[in-house]
Amino acid sequence: MAKNAKITKENHKMLYQNLSLSELQALAFKLGLNYQKRDIVIGLVGNLGSGKTTFAKSFAKALKIKKLKSPSFTILSVYGFQNRQLFHLDFYRLNHLSELEELGVKELLAGKNRIILIEWADKFPKILKACDLILKFKIISNNRRNVTSYNT
């Protein structure tokens, strides 16, 4: 991390403060490498433009997934890597639990050999509870972000 960024650790929470875009991408890449062989559900929470999709793209690069597209309109995108799958979901346009059922989210959460990244996971408290890791993104300025990670 650059000299302007600051990392604070307390209990089950890490706070990455004042991250530039490249520092956010480096954090995502590092987490992608760390979790590439694990089954994990990661909830990405924050306002529009706070860095959720940027994070997801860099996380995917660590898995050697060349192009991750924003699933805002498709809602669910699936990518193969190392005989495993990355599921990238975006709940921004969803409003009802029945929509999650139609997508088969319950089955995805119970699956194996997969990583799940869920943007706007906080729209559904049930989903947040199913996340192994929650990352909250906060805009500090045009090109600076705070990211708080919580292990659940």
Image (cartoon, rainbow, N blue to C red):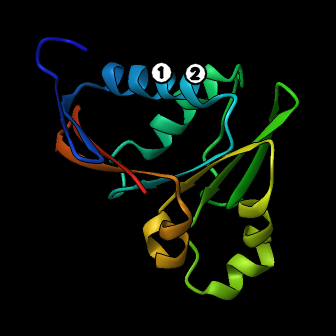
Kindly indicate the quadrant of the structure image that contains residue 96: bottom right
Q: Residue at x 60, y 46 (%)?
A: 70
- Residue found farthest to the right: 83
Horizontal and vertical percent position of residue 39: 68, 43
Horizontal and vertical percent position of residue 16: 23, 34
Badge 1 amino acid: Lys
Horizontal and vertical percent position of residue 7: 19, 28
Q: Residue at x 20, y 37 (%)?
A: 142
Depth order, front residue of 40/22 = 40
Q: Residue at x 35, y 28 (%)?
A: 24
Q: Which mark is residue 30?
A: 1
Element on which disc 1 rests? helix
C-beta proximity under 8 Å, tags 2 and 1: yes
Badge 2 amino acid: Leu
Tell me the quarter of the image containing the C terminus. bottom left
Which residue position holds label 2?
33
